[in-house]
Every structure is written in structure tokens, then in C-alpha cells.
Image (tube, helix red, strand yellow):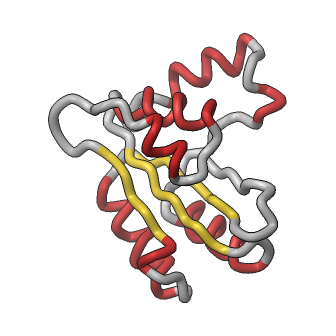
């Protein structure tokens, strides 16, 4: 998932992963690209049942519909990488880094309620390798 919020002060970018090693590699690359560890958050459940994290994600700057979607994906073993940065060049660098490390992209907002998007949502929240 990639999202850039329209807040001119900060961009909130999100990337959905199923492999914890891909998340670790993406974090390492982001830090190598000049991002601070304070600009990067990783959330996921490595074992056991996933708790409801919608309120936590909402408080971190994500939109409510995104938080619900990601919370559903946590139940299927997904991990979320969140980068808080300035919009523009740094946001593009972060997006490119996330893409290079296997981040999964969700359908755009204008496609969110189409029948195909609902079917895609069910597929996205499962490990694409299985």
C-alpha cells in the first residue's frame, strides 16, 4: 500500500509486507537513504492473534478506511511499514525504496467500492506467496 496524505507539513507513506525480512531490508534501505529511525514505524504480529490496531493506526496519521483495511490484513499475517516525511522529493525516495523491497499496493480510493476492488481486497489480505 502506498499513500501520501495531503498534509503539507508531513507525508504519511504506508507499505504492506508479508515477509518480516523484506520489512527489515526496507527499513535498512530507508535509513541508508537518509531517513531517521524516528520517521519509520513498523507494525505487525509475528505470532498469535492480531489485536485490533485501528485506533493506533488512526492516531499515527492514517485515514480511517486505511486503518480498517490494514487491521484486516494483520489477521492474515501482514506487516505495515509507515514513513513520516516531508512531501515531495523525500516522499518519492521513500516510495521508491518501499517498492524496491516488495511492498504491496492497494487499489486507489476511486476504485475502492467496485466489485473487483472488493474481490482484490480479499486477495490482498492473504499472503500472495501461498
42 left or right of 100 in image: left
Residue under the image location 50 percent in, 56 percent down: 102
Relative to the observer, which residue lies in front, 34 or 10? 10
Q: Position of residue 55 (x, y in %)?
A: 46, 37
Residue under the image location 51 percent in, 73 percent down: 39
35 left or right of 118 in image: left
In the picture, residue 20 is in which quadrant? Answer: bottom left
Task: Determine if residue 130 is in view.
Answer: no
Q: Position of residue 88 (x, y in %)?
A: 80, 74
Q: Position of residue 124 (x, y in %)?
A: 52, 30
In the picture, residue 58 is in which quadrant? Answer: top right
User: What is the residue that sits farthest to the top in this orientation?
Assistant: 115
- Above or below residue 114? Residue 101 is below
Task: Determine if residue 29 is in view.
Answer: yes
Q: How many marks?
A: 0
Question: The C terminus appears in which quarter of the rendering?
Answer: top left
Residue under the image location 53 percent in, 36 percent down: 67
Q: Position of residue 53 (x, y in %)?
A: 39, 37
Relative to the observer, which residue lies in front, 38 or 112? 38
Residue under the image location 44 percent in, 50 percent down: 80
124 left or right of 114 in image: left
Amino acid at each position: 500500500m502506498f499513500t501520501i496524505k495531503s498534509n503539507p507539513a508531513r507525508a504519511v507513506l504506508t507499505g504492506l509486507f508479508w515477509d518480516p525480512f523484506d520489512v527489515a531490508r526496507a527499513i535498512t534501505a530507508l535509513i541508508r537513504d537518509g531517513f531517521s529511525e524516528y520517521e519509520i514505524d513498523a507494525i505487525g504480529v509475528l505470532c498469535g492473534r492480531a489485536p485490533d490496531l485501528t485506533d493506533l493506526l488512526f492516531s499515527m496519521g492514517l485515514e480511517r478506511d486505511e486503518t480498517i483495511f490494514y487491521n484486516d490484513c494483520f489477521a492474515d499475517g501482514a506487516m505495515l511499514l509507515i514513513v513520516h516525511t516531508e512531501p515531495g522529493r523525500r516522499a518519492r525516495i521513500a516510495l521508491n525504496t518501499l517498492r524496491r523491497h516488495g511492498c504491496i499496493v492497494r487499489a486507489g480510493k476511486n476504485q475502492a467500492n467496485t466489485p473487483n476492488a472488493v474481490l482484490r481486497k480479499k486477495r490482498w489480505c492473504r499472503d500472495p506467496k501461498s
